[in-house]
Amino acid sequence: MKNLIKLSVIPAMLLMFLASCTKEGPAGQDGTNGTDGKDGIAGESGTAGCVQCHTSNENMMLKAAQWENSGHATGTSWARGTSASCAECHSSQGFQEKVATGSVTNAPVMPLAANCYTCHNIHETYTTADWTNKKTTGVEFNQNGVVYESANPNANTCVQCHQTRAITAIDLTSTADYQITSYRFGPHHGPQGNMLAGAGKSGAVELGTDTYTNSTHASLDCISCHMAEGDLTIGGHTNHISTGTWGTDKKINPAGCVTCHSGYTTAADLTAWVEGKRSDNEVLFNQLHDKLFALKLIDASGYVLGDDQTNRAGTSNPLNVSPQIAGAIYNYKFIEEDLSMMIHNPKYAKKLLEQSLAVLP
């Protein structure tokens, strides 16, 4: 008997669903003295909007499958969205609130990983306009208040989170020491937007008197490279421009590069070329790491040491250094956390490294 009751509920629920998808047309003319009135105009089919996205070509399924392989959908970074200060980038709900209101008032009780609703205006018009991005206007950087406009307005969605966190400004004209009270001093994870902004805008510490310039990459945007056409593991909504590990099974998506780098038609050739560039850059980056380590300013893992030169920096064991040395430490972390090993803006990143090395004793 219980099974019969359950089965009888299903058709009723289906009728309710179909009824809710039917749009009513204008009312017909009332009848008089009990005679029938005229029929109204039939309403638009309830599925007319749905099928603009939910088609039989499976494009939406493809995007969903790619997204499942993205760094945004995997891992556990979203689990850190339980505080208001972290929720704006570590939870879907927090990100949407930040974009809509400019701040996050309360962290979500159950933070969600980034999903379709995070970036797109899903189920607002029930047309293809729902695929538009929530954040398309310029992004004000946390560190210096510079408003950055990506070459592609949709990439401002990426920059909203892929930027440095704010630290106490480093005044290079000051003769007083700069105090570092956290061993995690630096831009935090993912300052790619700042790196693309580059010279005079990034929030990195531009030491020395040399002129800082940008590479061609700085005039591009996240989407044209990282979301170029690919497969289920690379490109598209995976956001990966490469897969695998450098030096072993690394593979770069040619579709994200060949528009400008037309001389490389295969993933193998392109990967070998980029790997060579990264290796050259790592030599300079490692020089800065080794010098900071030798001066006992950072430990082997790159965390800042306090004045005792043994324990990591903290409020009870701060590091007091000149603004120039604080800037060198910051630039080291800035380039490390960018994760591209200077590929995002090679000229700018290289100058930051060179000038940082120059100020160290």
Image: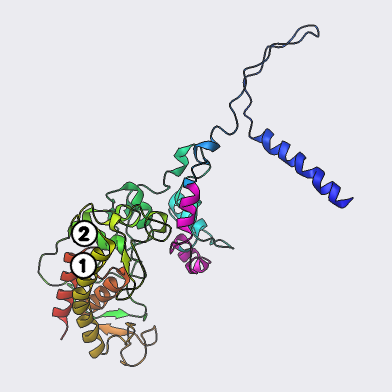
Give the amino acid type for the residue marked by disc 1 in the picture.
Trp
Quadrant where the C terminus sits is bottom left
Percent of width and height locating residue 202:
25, 62
Give the amino acid type for the residue marked by disc 2 in the picture.
Tyr
Secondary-structure class at tag 1? helix
Relative height, residue 149 to residue 25 (above, below): below
How many other residues sit within 10 Å of disc 1, few (<14), some (14-19) or many (≥20)? few
Would you say residue 171 is visible in this rendering? no
- Which residue occupies 23% across, 75% down? 327
Q: Is residue 325 left or right of residue 164?
A: left
Specify the segment rendered in magenta: 60-89
Is 34 in the magenta? no
Secondary-structure class at tag 2? loop
Q: Residue furthest top?
A: 33
- Which residue occupies 28% across, 53% down? 221
Contact between marks 1 and 2 (CB within 8 A): the answer is: yes
Quarter of image, res 108? bottom right
Residue under label 1: 273
How many other residues sit within 10 Å of disc 2, few (<14), some (14-19) or many (≥20)? some
Is 65 in the magenta? yes
Question: Which of disc 2 and disc 1 is earlier in sequence?
Answer: 2
Residue under label 2: 264
- The secondary structure making up most of the magenta span is helix
